Image: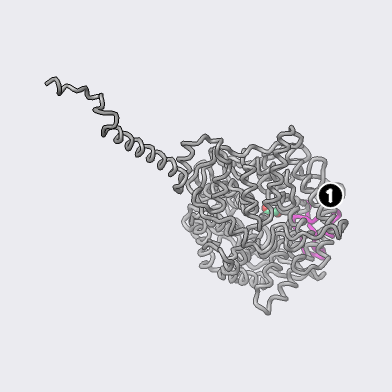
Amino acid sequence: MLMRKVPVFVPASPWGLRLPQKFLFLLFLSGLVTLCFGALFLLPNSSRLKRLFLAPRTQQPGLEVVAEVAGHPLAREQESPPNPAPAVPAPGEDDASSQANARRRKGWLRRTHPTGTREMATAARSSGSAALRPQEPSIPFSFDFHAFQSRLRHPVQGTRADESKEPQSLVRAQREKIKEMMQFAWQSYKRYAMGKNELRPLTKDGYEGSMFGGLSGATIIDSLDTLYLMELQDEFQEAKAWVEENFHLNVSGEASLFEVNIRYIGGLLSAFYLTGEEVFRIKAIKLGEKLLPAFNTPTGIPKGVVNFKSSSNRSWGWAMAGSSSILAEFGSLHLEFLHLTELSGNQVFAEKVRNIRKVLRKIDKPFGLYPNFLSPVSGNWMQHHVSVGGLGDSFYEYLIKSWLMSAKTDVEAKDMYYEALEAIETHLLNVSPGGLTYIAEWRGGILDHKMGHLACFSGGMIALGAEDAKEEKRARYRELAAQITKTCHESYARSDTKLGPEAFWFNSGREAVATQLSESYYILRPEVVESYMYLWRQTHDPIYREWGWEVVTALEKYCRTEAGFSGIQDVYSSIPNHDNKQQTFFLAETLKYLYLLFSEDDVLSLEDWVFNTEAHPLPVNHSDSPGRGGGQL
Ligand code: DMJ
């Protein structure tokens, strides 16, 4: 019996069966641990697990975003990276920050070359510049920025002229002067109004206005691509840092669908396509989503105003007593909305604008013309006022540009454009007794013999569309574009300041001049220089650069103030009465088009880009290029 009482914890012998069992068990356990840990690094979509196990600062800032930009599946589900990029310090800050700034600048330069996307990604990673703010959720997408950039046919900033051969060339000096104007406009805005929508240069303060529903920084977002294009690196970084740190979308006012789309969404989309910086893509899409309630109408034709707080909509009170949507407003969404779908994978944006097209296609057009007021409830025209100036203008522009942006596959847009142009030619086009060609306004068959400054974009539009017209019309459209642009130049040349009035008439022997003070103002608008730019690219006739330079000279003389550029109240008075406003489109459009007028044709080549109506370049869908990934455009 005693013999049976062996203590259980004493091995029968040191080399008995229990020890090898233990050894094997330990071996198995350690193998299991190694396998699990290794899996963290080997399995796809493991970034969340990594974050659990690795201290945030051991990850490279922005790495996942860069992977996402390159279409890497690893990043699809990632949340915002833990270390957002620091804001760029203002010039004159301490040494450490200027070194960081210099590093960022270097990265920026490398990112400008479209074929150097690998370098761009590296630069974005090393500067942390693609990082999002922690509260900004990522939006999964499969857009391959690398493939997109490799499809561009020209470098964004053009091939470099050999400047050593022509160091003092006139055109280069002119371009530099325009760049200096942009720098001055930006610095003035930054100094007195940073973060506000616009600068008031006389009172040296900022102005918010009521068009943007509480969104801020309209000048910043409208300026991003111009700063980038002009290689104003420090200024571009300042603008980008503001977007990263301070551009908040949780606002609750009433906004103009049109203005938010063309300025904010257009500006953010361009900034994304030029740089690949994720922050611009995310904010463009998020803002696009905030605009969608405008489309909640029986026809799907959006109303002009959207309430960001209640997600309700309404028409402008002045639009047929609040009953109408405006042709130029709902007709100028197509380019941006297709790109929102392209960059988000969300079909809703494309569906909204395709529906607008469908409604317009179906509805009867008086004499083939498109009136400016349409009921979003019944889908009927509310008044027969037709104009290629205000209220109508960019609707026509977006038809021809939709055709071009689709790499000439959107035949419906093309047909609609040429049919509309035929009708305009037949019913609105006139030649004055003095031989000036102009496009009048049409009110149920009666003509107003006037052109608005806004209508002067049409010279450029007709030039842009001339090449794809029926063969027998091509020369005619080229000539028409040149004639209209000449008339718009006359409206400048006939004023004391050599700047053009808001509207000019062809009546009783007075031609291309405003007839009352209320139409004599100039608010830094771009349409005339926009046409000079397109006509220059089409003809290379030096007259367009001469005319463009006249505008530069006049802007310097009459619109430049101590603290920025300002509009003037009367172009017929050589003693300027400033309106105290530096409009955002002066930086987005007027200065950009002037700069392009004095640049080579392959800078933002028209083979690669279409400009939205706020001059923000959006890429053409080169579907014939290898690597094209079934886009929406
Ligand atoms: C810009 O905001 C756009 O060009 C728009 O289409 C019409 N007008 C202004 C500039 O004049």
Residue in the picture at 50% in, 55% down: 345
SS at mark 1? helix
Location of residue 27 (image quadrant)? top left
Question: Is 502 covered by the magenta stretch?
Answer: yes
Residue 226 against residue 38 in the figure, above or below: below
Location of residue 374 (image quadrant)? bottom right
Residue receiving disc 1 = 556
Does ligand 1 reach within 8 Å of label 1's beta carbon?
A: no
Quadrant of the image containing the N terminus? top left
Residue 401 appears in the figure: yes
Residue in the picture at 30% in, 35% down: 20
Relative placement, left or right, of 456 versus 339 is right
Q: Amino acid at mark 1?
A: Glu
Question: Where's residue 522, x and y in %?
Answer: 77, 52
Relative placement, left or right, of 76 versus 577 is left
Question: Is 278 covered by the magenta stretch?
Answer: no
- Residues in magenta, as a range: 491-517
